[in-house]
Amino acid sequence: MTSAAHTAPYADPDLAVGLAEPATPERRSARWRTLATRHRTDLAVGLLFVLLAGWLTHGLWPDPTGRVLALNPEDQTLYEWFLAVDSRALLGDFGLLTDRLNTPDGVNLMTNTTVIALGVLFAPVTLLFGAPVTFALLAGANLAGTAIAWYLLLNRTLHARRLAAALGAGLCGFGPGMLSQSNSHLHMTAQWLVPVIVWLVVRLLRAADPGPATTGRPDRRRITTSAAGLAAAVTVQAFVGEEVLFLSAVTLLVMTVAYGVADRELLRRAWPGFAGGLMLAAGLALTVLGYPLWFQFAGPQGVADGMFSPHYFSADLASWWTISPLSVVGSDSSARLTTGPAEYNTFLGWPLLLVAVACAVWLRRRPLVVACAVAAVVMGALSLGPQLVLDGDRSTMPGPYALLVGLPVVDGALPMRFGLALLPLTGTLLTLAVDRALRDTGRARRLVPAAVGAALLSVFPAPLPTVDRPALPEFVTGGHWRECVRPGGVLVPVPAATPKEPWPMRWATAADAAFGIPEGFFIGPYGRDGAATMGTYKQPTSALLADVAKRGEEPVIGTEQRRQAAKDADFWGASCVALTDDAPHAESLRRTLEQLYGPATRIADAWIWRV
């Protein structure tokens, strides 16, 4: 975040010489050779990131349909269903309220983390090869794409040397929190637009700065184009992952304040144009996002509050100096310091923390370093939640997040995810330090890159654990479901999908969400006074069948149960009920269903009842 007048010390030495000199054939030839070398290096770095992402997610291949992330298969099932529903936009069958889950009420796609932009973008892949293939591609692409985007920002905007930019970007894209969130949280790992947003903010600031000369003026054209670009990037990111957008906005706000305090002269010169550009960007973005945001909070099936307790999803202070269990040198014993394997957001480890602090102290006179350090402290403190937790023991000492509890929008965030902001902040600090060292001629030239490299090795990621998952029934994969329900109708799988056991949602996913199913795994307004809950309440027949599936005991079925079964089928708008051979206690369920709905019809490996 520096004006053009302040970037001279960090200009790229490979291109600085000769650009203002006469363009002789020899100089033009030398410039083209330099550019060719530069692009080859950039391509090599990008390829390295792609290969690393492929290695980390290779367990999902070569058969994504038959493989699943071992540490969070439930959420993978959910996100594959999201991708299937999103892909229907290509077929002209899409809305912010879908009836393909939780029939008849439906599901608000804005309330849930449905990665709409990714789903629509990859719709051709989903429709041709299936949602599991799209999921596997995105699991790796999000890691590589985020790292590549940060590399380009650090190299082209900060003019850091390529080695320095590659090291910092590697942490941004493959750090502990990113790998942890790769356990099925596509909305959290799709951060490749964040560097674009940062670049547009920097571009806006530079355009707003007239320079130290009294005759200088802000570049209004660049302010306008930067604001328009920022609005576009923010809008797209809102449909990829609102939580990442929120965390980015908070981090940039803290950085802006800290940078302004560190460089008051720049603040005085650029503030009017910068603030105006931000307001223009906000106005343009809200023009597009106004209705979707209203729909999210106040529309059908929308919720205005968060459903996750900030006390439960608070980072343990000890996790900050602990190495992630998902790192090559990590230990599973430290997993107790967080809520689950998808939330190792703050596990930076003591080697990386020490090196990052040393780099910040060494470069403390640079305003950007001050801004990164202050933002890291603020975001790290907020990650600790409303009450401090140390080594698993919750104290009575309040954390800074206690000031935010109950605030609109903020209430839906998970405190421990504020720690994810430290990856790009730390990556930027390491990049600036290595870049400074590489321009040095003393001991720092060797010492700093070696220390940074060793710190990064301590958090080097291991491949994501994967396992085989059960094959889908022939009734689904062979398209036999069409004999049971027309496209757009409702099929009732037995037992029904739940947040803890969402597996029947795979049926709809495999059919590209061509039919709806009742209940399921989603966020909806089924708590007290419309508060957010995970899933919905079961209808009596669904609860009865779930109990049979769990216990294997057949209930006594009478007239009342048959009447209720017919009523529930009518409530769901169901065309048929289906039971496959792989269901738990399948024979007990079949006999119970025959008492409820009459004789069954055999289709492939399923029994069906047309209701």
Image (spheres, helix red, strand yellow):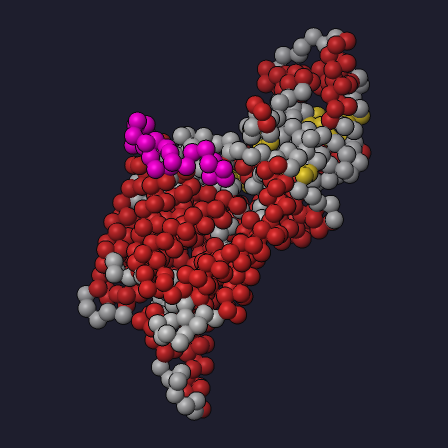
Q: Is residue 347 above or below residue 457?
A: above
Most distant residue in the left direction = 443
Q: Is residue 400 magenta?
A: yes
**Quadrant assignment, res 68:** top right
**Residue located 30% across and 58% down the image:** 262
Q: Nearer the viewer, residue 547 or 24?
A: 24
**Residue located 41% across and 37% down the image:** 404
Q: Nearer the viewer, residue 133 or 530?
A: 530
**Quadrant assignment, res 566:** top right
**Residue located 39% across and 88% down the image:** 21
Evaluate whether residue 525 shows in this view. Answer: yes
Residue 544 location, x and y as percent? 66, 16
Q: Is residue 447 magenta?
A: no
Bounds of the magenta segment:
386-411
Residue 532 location, x and y as percent? 56, 30
- In the picture, which quadrant includes the N terminus? bottom left
Q: Nearer the viewer, residue 40 or 301?
A: 301
